[in-house]
């Protein structure tokens, strides 16, 4: 045992007696150890020994709850409390509880506000984003200006003509593909090799070879 731990163990009875009287509530040895070990450097064995010593001396009381001992201050040392005093204490507890709840709610509101402020852009970041958006808008404005000034606009009639020709060529494409497919199928009926070998020998290239899809009508 280190010197500091030994000194703490020597003074443990006084520390524990003062603690139990101030708190005036029941504790197990584990509870006392957990509450005081950091502040006073007490080991669990020293806490158990001091509690048992105080109980034997009659300075504190102990009771068994199942397999666990509970220690608490001797109640004879405290003044008797009248019903009026108890009612006054109950009223104070109610008032303090309401105050705590109000403060907790205020804390939650402030935490939410802090989170919102923390996630918001800083002034330099906002200024930078505004500048970037202004530059982007200026670029779009310039492009729109150039488009409006252009003289090669496509008229609705010209646009319709282009779509009309597209439909025409797609129909022709579909027609010729069907004719070629029917012709190849007729040849393959008497061809001794596979369709792939026939296409390679003849030199036929299909739309599928180039991942080309016939547009919808």
Image (spheres, grey):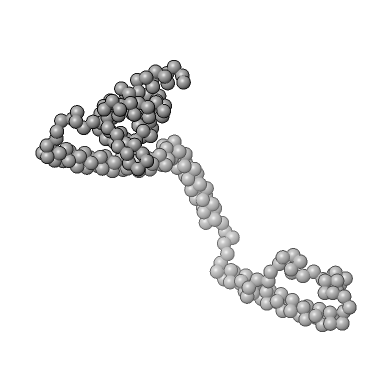
Residue 151 locus on image (x, y percent): 57, 59
**Residue found 77% across the figure and 70% down from its top:** 206
Task: Name the foreground residue: 155 vs 47.
Answer: 47
Left-right relation of 27 to 174: left
Task: Name the foreground residue: 157 vs 168.
Answer: 168
Residue 66 locus on image (x, y percent): 35, 43
Residue 167 locus on image (x, y percent): 64, 74
Q: As displayed, is residue 114 above or below residue 172?
A: above
Q: In which quarter of the image is residue 197?
A: bottom right
Q: Which residue lies furthest to the front in this view?
A: 56
**Residue 217 visible in this rendered orientation of the protein:** yes
**Residue found 85% across the figure and 69% down from its top:** 200
**Residue found 42% across the figure and 21% down from its top:** 5
Q: As displayed, is residue 198 above or below residue 74?
A: below
Q: In the picture, which quadrant includes the C terminus? A: bottom right
Left-right relation of 117 to 186: left
Q: In which quarter of the image is residue 210?
A: bottom right
Q: Quadrant of residue 46?
A: top left
Task: Name the foreground residue: 93 vs 215.
Answer: 93
**Residue found 38% across the figure and 22% down from its top:** 9
Q: As displayed, is residue 96 above or below residue 4?
A: below
């Amino acid at each position: 045992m280190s010197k500091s731990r030994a000194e703490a163990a020597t003074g443990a009875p006084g520390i524990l007696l003062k603690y139990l009287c101030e708190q005036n509530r029941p504790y197990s040895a584990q509870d006392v150890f957990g509450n005081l070990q950091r502040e006073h450097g007490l080991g669990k064995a020293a806490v158990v020994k001091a509690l048992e010593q105080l109980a034997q001396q009659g300075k504190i009381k102990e009771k068994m709850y199942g397999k666990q001992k509970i220690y608490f201050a001797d109640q004879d040392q405290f003044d008797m409390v009248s019903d009026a005093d108890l009612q006054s204490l109950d009223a104070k507890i109610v008032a303090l509880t309401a105050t705590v709840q109000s403060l907790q709610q205020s804390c939650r509101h402030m935490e939410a506000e802090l989170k919102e402020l923390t996630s918001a852009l800083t002034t330099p970041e906002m200024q930078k984003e505004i500048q970037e958006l202004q530059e982007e808008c200026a670029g779009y404005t310039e492009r729109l200006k150039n488009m409006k000034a252009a003289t090669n606009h496509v008229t609705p009639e010209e646009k319709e003509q282009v779509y009309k020709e597209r439909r025409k060529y797609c129909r022709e494409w579909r027609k010729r593909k069907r004719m070629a497919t029917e012709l190849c199928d007729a040849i393959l009926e008497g061809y001794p090799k596979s369709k792939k070998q026939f296409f390679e020998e003849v030199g036929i290239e299909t739309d599928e070879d180039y991942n080309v899809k016939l547009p919808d009508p």
